[in-house]
Image (tube, helix red, strand yellow):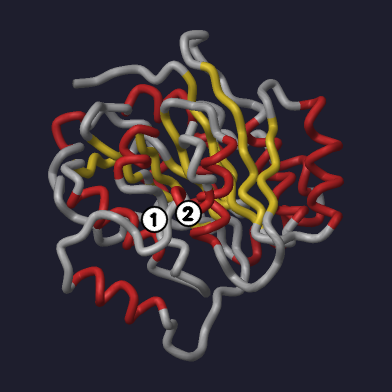
Amino acid sequence: MKSAPAKISVIVSTYNSPVFLEMVLRSLAWQRLDGRTDFEVVVADDGSGPETRALIERLRPEMPCPLLHAWQPDTGFRLAESRNNALLQASGDYIVFIDGDCMVLPDFIAAHARLAERGCFVAGARCYIKRGQTEKMLKQPLAWTRPNRLAWFARALFARANRPFQLLNLPLDWRRHRHPDRWQKVQTCNLAVWRQDIDRVDGFDATYVGHGLEDSDFALRLLRAGLRRKSGRFASVVLHLWHPRPTGKRSPNVERFEALLASSRHRPIVGISHLVPADKEIA
């Protein structure tokens, strides 16, 4: 059953990348909504320095919506717990997760509002902006913060980004439930979930530290809690700015996720509830 959210909380994860973050927040400032859906932005900050706090304070008066800052001390890569901290501040009945290196098109939130469906989470798409194009954008970052769908489609056709056809807005409702039980390739750079369903699985598992698989853990537990995956392809897309990706040794998160696969649980080892005092409820 489709049901338009009353309020959407966009949670943007970041760590010491104020230039990228400003580009993302300014792209969110251009959102076109139909007037029926409110939204707010919550920055999930995994311990950034004072430059990020100063940026948020500077942008707050310019945003068309509340801009909140959920900061935690820098004690290593703790993206899962950072998102849980942001969820404690979020007041929306529908949550959209993106990353602080992913700009959005002006209809991004409206597209997620249209795709929202009870009993489902929505896995959106992303287009990677190529290195040369990203470096060009970083010379004048504020000139690129109102992305145009057709312009980016043309750039992608000329190899300045990948997946050009994801930038087309196509009415594919009949294909949106093709893989309802698939957790693979669900990524929190573009993921929408009803707040009540997040609370049902107690949020992200904060035992995941370092890069990777906290989003797969989250998606698998949502499926085990009775949710279905819905595709946001060809409707909801983010533009992922290029940056070097982590490489090297095997992540300890691999063992954590393998242990989840071998079990049947849908609750995390350490979730949102561990951040809430025993005498209080999660909002």
x then y, percent, for residue 101:
61, 54
Q: Which residue is drawn at 47% across and 52% down?
A: 189
Q: Callout 2: 10 Å neighbours few (<14), some, many (20+)?
A: few
First along the sequence among labels 2 and 1: 1
Q: Residue at x 45, y 35 (%)?
A: 95
Image quadrant where residue 86 sits: top right
In the image as oriented, which residue stretches furthest toward the bottom?
Answer: 249
Answer with the quarter of the image where residue 214 lies.
Answer: bottom left
| Type of the residue with mark 1 | Gln
| Distance from Cα at disc 2 to Cα at disc 1 | 24 Å
Residue 139, percent across and down? Answer: 81, 56
Task: Quickly name the residue at label 1.
Answer: 187
Residue lying at the far front of the rendered structure: 279
Question: Which three-letter amino acid code belongs to the residue tagged 2?
Answer: His
Judging by the rendered image, the residue that carries numbered circle 2 is: 274
**The N terminus sits in image quarter:** top left
SS at mark 2? helix
